[in-house]
Amino acid sequence: MLPNRKLLDAGHEDTAAFILRETTIATLNVARGLKHELDVARCRPRARAGSIGGKVLGSELEVLERRLAGGAQQRAESRALVEELRGTLDDERERHTILTGAVAELRDELASAKMSCSASDAAAEALRAQLARARESCESSSARANALQLDLDAMRREHAATVSAAAHLGAKLDACLAREAELSQGAAEAAAALAIVQRERADALLALESARAELMAAQAERVAAVSTASELHVALEGALRAQRERETADRDGAGAALAAENACAAGLATTTAELRAALEEAQRRYVDIAAAADSLRIELATARAQHEQHAVAVRARDDELLESTRREASARAAADKLRAALGEAHEREVAALAAATELRVALDSAQSVRADSALVAAVLLRAELSATERAAAAELAVTADRLRDVEAQLKARDADLALERERHRNALASRAGDASAVAALAEARAALAHSSDEHARSTAQAQAHMRELLAELVAARAPRAPVEREPAERERTERLRAELAAANGRQVAIAAVVDDLHRELQRTESFHARQLAAARKNERAALACAERAEREVHSLRAAFASDAADQQVQCDLPTAASADASLHGALQTAARGPACGSPERRADAGAIAAQLNSEQRVIKRVLVEATERLAATRERSQMLAEELARANAQLAQHAAPPAVDFDGALR
């Protein structure tokens, strides 16, 4: 039976002896009082017997007798009370003997308690030493946590830079897609222009065929005119012979007529030779134009094949972009799974801390029954540590809730960002080639940059919360370092380390995915550079074809002009003064060409010239537009090269972030 701690604190070690002594003293006091009253009652009649009269003495004696009788009764009661008190005293003595044995046992227990007190003092000293070591380890853990916080800040900045670089690369990819669409549109316009040029050249060929037919008709007319002239020449010779026979005297006039006739025949022969040369030149030009048309058809087929290859490459690039988007989504899903696993691990850690706290409180309450003041102090210290751990567990729970809220916000912002990207891509795809697409692209880039900044800030906040959670976990685990861990706790710690190692591996995988995206961007840039070179080559070929067509047009116009001049000169040749009216009309009919022919032929020649002029203007306009597009493409290529150089520099500066040593932090 344990003693009363209030009496022990008041200084009364022997409770039974104290009670017995107090009871005995009270009984003796009562007995002394009764004896004193009895002695007073006995002595009072003798003291007053000689000085008081008879009546008074009689009354007093009666009173005294009554009092004596009452005193005898009181003495009897006192004797009974004394007997009762003696029995009680015997009982109390027996109890005192029993209590003396109990006191001896309690003294032995007190000695053992003092020995346990000394052991508890030693344990308290050991606990104080452990507490000092725990404080030192806590300080070292705080320093390590500060270093990890600095590393996390650096990683956060690197991650923000990487996210911004990725956003910039995404914007550049969108710009590349837009430029690719513009190049495709330019290629389509070039193909349309080539088709227009081909149609115009076909029309020119038809005009040349009609001109050739007209030349053949003119040649036939001139052959008929030559035959008519020869017949007329024969008739003229007959007439001249008859005239010479008739006019033998006028030899000078006959010689002059013969000279005029010879001159006319020479002019007809020269005209015939020139017409034959012009016909041969027209045939050669027709062959050249046909060859140029064949080369243009070949170039157009090559351009169409290149356009089809470009379309296939664009589709492949779209597939690769979709694949990269899917990989990014899978990486984000893996990151979400990692965050969920970390949250579950933190919840399990909080539950383990709560269970350990409850066990420690129960153990402390069981040990505090036989503990002294030092042990009570140790228990209070442990209770403070338990309260600290509970507060840390509560803070961990609050931090986990905050982390879940931040992750939910991050997921919502990722969804909003994906919707924003999809909307802007649809808007860009629907408004490609429009002038307002530039402003929409700028707005999309600004919104994408803002969303990327928001995503970077959210990621930084989430990483900061994770770092705070890790620091709080380290701070909560540091005071319990000297305590032996349970197997389940060690297993959970190992599992948490494995999850953290897997998280580091996923981070390395994400960095590898970023590197793959960068390489893919480089391949895309090289592909666009090749496409740009091919477009430039096609533009140079188109320019060369246009120049050749222009030269052919100029040569044709010069040929037509020379033919017209020759025919005009031939039309202006003087006829023989001595020829009659029929011969003069025949010579005019034979010398009349396309330029000097009928009004219908002159109208056709004017229409052909106007068509050639319009073709030349169209070709010049196409050349100017192609030159402007080439200059704009060169400027965009230069800007793209500068942006690619800046992105390469940023990626070189911000390499893949190193894995965080979470195991060391946990240790």
Image (spheres, rainbow, N blue to C red):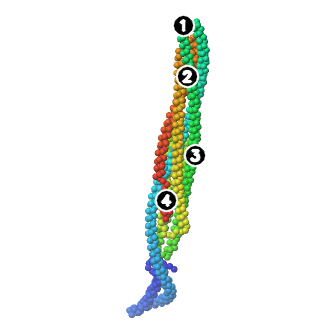
Query: SS class of the residue under badge 4?
Result: loop
Q: CA distance from mark 4 to mark 2?
A: 94 Å
The type of residue carrying mark 3 is Ala
- For residue 274, which numbered disc appears in the image? 2
Between residues 18 and 462, which one lies in front from this camera angle? Answer: 462
Q: Is residue 368 above or below residue 588?
A: below
Along the polypeptide, which appears first: circle 3 or circle 2?
Answer: 2
Find out whether the residues at labels 4 and 2 contact each other: C-beta distance under 8 Å: no
Image position, residue 79 (x, y; %): 49, 89
Q: CA distance from mark 3 to mark 1?
A: 98 Å
Along the polypeptide, which appears first: circle 1 or circle 2?
Answer: 1
**Residue 602 shows in this picture:** no
Q: Which residue is mark 1?
A: 250
Image position, residue 255 (x, y; %): 54, 11
Quarter of the view holding residue 248: top right
Between residues 470 and 23, which one lies in front from this camera angle? Answer: 470
- For residue 316, which numbered disc appears in the image? 3
Query: SS class of the residue under badge 3?
Result: helix
- For residue 660, which numbered disc appears in the image? 4
Q: Is residue 352 above or below residue 152?
A: below
Image position, residue 286 (x, y; %): 58, 29
Find out whether the residues at labels 1 and 2 contact each other: C-beta distance under 8 Å: no
